[in-house]
Image (cartoon, grey):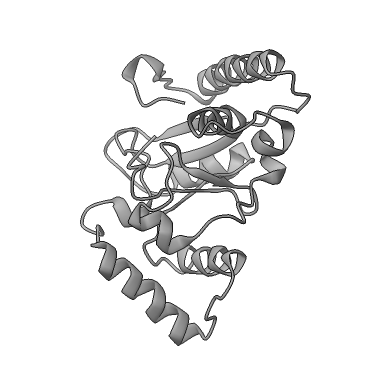
Amino acid sequence: MSTKTDNIKVSNSFEGFYELRNKAEKILKERTKLELINNNLNIKPEIWYRGQANHEYKLLPSLLRPPNVLSINRELELFNKYSRLSRLNPTTRIEEWTQLFKMQHQFIPTRLLDWSQSLNVALYFALKEDEHNPPCIILFSPILLYIKKVKQENEPINERNVSPKYINDLDFSYEDSIEGKKSSKYPVVNKSPLVCFFDKNCPTF
């Protein structure tokens, strides 16, 4: 996935849009399959979608979009205040994920960026707002991103490390990630619900 302009294709009709989508999905699946073959992995490629009301929007979670950008101290304060008020008080890493999901879907700024395996859901979010600029649909291969992440961290490339069904990252620590104590060049991907988490050193795709 890229935000480069040479990867942006424009259509003025639904028929043309679906044709472009089919071509883009085919290319993305072929690239994913090639990476899987090169690494001797037997995993079915997945395509995720994101709809945005404006094609000029960057792939940034709400907390990293102006004017929502907070200092790390204010971000931790927001997280801890929500914990107290909701009485969640997460004590494990999986509970931290759960709290972030709840915050995200109550429209509280977080480092989570939502995706869907349904093109129709992505279309809904792309078309629900009346923007002056054209909307867009972004296609994304989580396996390609995770292979890059694993290589960058010099971890073994195996099915457990790169298959989306294993990407509930139980080694994730919210505070460590936003403070940069444990970080990655690539977003951490979580499978259920479909989100990417952006840590301190990962400002965008």
For residue 195, above or below residue 20? below
Q: Residue furthest left?
A: 67
User: Going 42% across and 59% down the picture, which residue do you hit?
Assistant: 176
User: Going 27% across and 68% down the picture, which residue do you hit?
Assistant: 73
For residue 11, above or below residue 163? above
- Please tell me in which quadrant of the rendered image residue 189 appears: top right
Toward the viewer: 45 or 95?
95
* Residue 4 position in % (x across, y down): 34, 21
* Residue 182 position in % (x across, y down): 43, 50
- Please tell me in which quadrant of the rendered image residue 8 appears: top left
Q: Is residue 200 left or right of residue 190?
A: left
Q: Residue furthest right?
A: 42
User: Going 45% across and 37% down the picture, which residue do you hit?
Assistant: 186
* Residue 66 position in % (x across, y down): 22, 53
Looking at the rendered image, the quarter that the C terminus falls into is top left
Toward the viewer: 57 or 133?
57
* Residue 41 position in % (x across, y down): 74, 23
Number of numbered discs visible in the structure rendering: 0
Toward the viewer: 65 or 17?
65
User: Going 40% across and 77% down the picture, which residue do you hit?
Assistant: 80
Q: Is residue 76 left or right of residue 104?
A: left
For residue 136, above or below residue 127? above
For residue 74, above or below residue 83? above
